[in-house]
Amino acid sequence: IISWTGTGSNGTVAHGLGVTPEMYIVKRRDAGGHSWAVYTATLGATKQLRLSGTNAEITTANIWNNTEPTSSVFSVGTNTDSNASSGTHIAYCFHSVDGYSKIGSYTGNGNADGTFVYTGFRPAFILFKRTNTTSNWNLRDSKRDPQNVTGQYLNADTAGAEGTTGSNLIDFTSNGFKTRGVGSASNASGSTYIYMAFAEQPFKYANA
């Protein structure tokens, strides 16, 4: 987690992870009207997603300065969502850790016998988003849905109450997750989805 004061000019921010981040979520703190900007390695530094909206991937040259992160820094451009002059910003940076967390992408197949995504552990929490068209940020967890299939969801981009879906079902497996529905939010044929998952237990201690 990093906080910094923006300069309004192209620059870098030290993230302290020691490895290259695969996702970071940035928010300007001192002024309203600014989106939660999201970088993912799947889309790269010429694109962004917005955690606060359902937008598809957005091409924005000045959000990450079209520059991929390194093991020490990530880049910001002149966009006021990520680097407003004298603006205060916060970033939450993530990378995959074997047996604990996994950040990546998958392609939907549009079939009830859906895509399997290997994480290397049984997930306790998954956040996922379709990137090639508008779609909600969907949150699933093993506390609200301890048994498969999981259908209870919350959307990070809305103020809505919890919902239950019959078309965007997901199984949590011992080493990943598998889509079990044909809904567009999780498994549209040929569509790309990004995800971030965290383990129920570190894999070497898992019983499932």
Image (cartoon, rainbow, N blue to C red):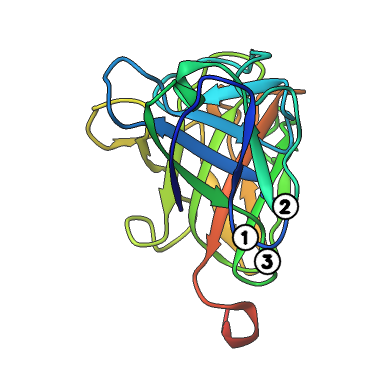
The image position of residue 81, as x and y in percent, is 45, 21
**Residue matched to label 3:** 175
Residue 17, numbered circle: 1
Q: Is the C-beta separation of discs 1 and 2 under 8 Å?
A: yes
Q: Nearer the viewer, mark 2 or mark 3?
A: 2
Q: CA distance from mark 1 to mark 3?
A: 25 Å
Mark 3 belongs to which amino acid?
A: Asn
Q: Nearer the viewer, residue 157 or 115?
A: 157
Q: Is residue 54 visible?
A: no
Quarter holding residue 109: top right
In terms of secondary structure, where does tag 3 sit? loop
Q: Is residue 52 visible?
A: yes
Quarter holding residue 173: bottom right
**2 or 3: tag closer to the N-terminus:** 2
Residue 20, numbered circle: 2
Mark 2 belongs to which amino acid?
A: Thr
Mark 1 belongs to which amino acid?
A: Leu
